[in-house]
Image (cartoon, grey):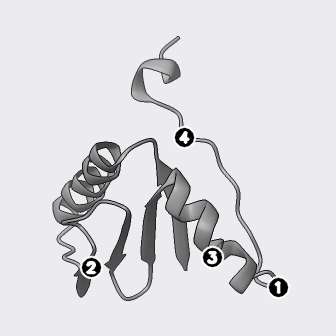
Amino acid sequence: MFLIASGTSTRHVKSLIDDVEAALREEGRRPIRREGAEYGEWVLLDYGDVVFHIFDRDTRAYYELERLWADAPRIEFAFMSPTSESE
C-alpha cells in the first residue's frame, strides 16, 4: 500500500515523518528505507507492506504520483485531529 500525503512546508513534512515514525515505533516497526528526510520536500518511508510518500505541496503537484497508479484502487480519508474527536 502507498500512502501519499502533503505537508504545508518542509518543517511540516519533517514533523509528519517524525510522527509517523514515532507511532510505528510504538508498534515495534522500523522503516526498511528512509530517504529525503534531510530536505523535507519528498520523504519516502518504506515499511515493506506500506510505503509513505510525504511531500511539500509544490513537490507533490510537480510529480503527481497519483497518476502513476491511476488504475489502482484509492482509499481517501480526511485526517481528524484528537481534539476534533471529542467535540
Looking at the image, is mark 3 or mark 1 nearer the viewer?
3
Looking at the image, is mark 1 or mark 4 nearer the viewer?
1
Q: CA distance from mark 3 to mark 4?
A: 20 Å
Do the residues bearing badges 3 and 1 touch, measured as CB atoms within 8 Å? Answer: no
Residue tagged 1? 71
Of 51 and 67, which appears nearest the observer? 67
Please state if 67 lies on the left or on the right of 43 as rendered. Answer: right
Q: CA distance from mark 2 to mark 3?
A: 16 Å
Q: CA distance from mark 1 to mark 4?
A: 24 Å
Residue tagged 4? 79
The amino acid beneath tag 2 is: Glu
Q: CA distance from mark 3 to mark 1?
A: 12 Å
Crowdedness of circle 4 by 10 Å Cα count: few (<14), some, many (20+)? Answer: few
Residue tagged 3? 65
Of 13 and 87, which appears nearest the observer? 13
Disc on the earlier residue, 1 or 4: 1
Q: Is residue 31 above or below residue 39?
A: below
Disc on the earlier residue, 2 or 3: 2
Looking at the image, is mark 1 or mark 2 nearer the viewer?
2
Q: Is residue 41 above or below residue 16?
A: below
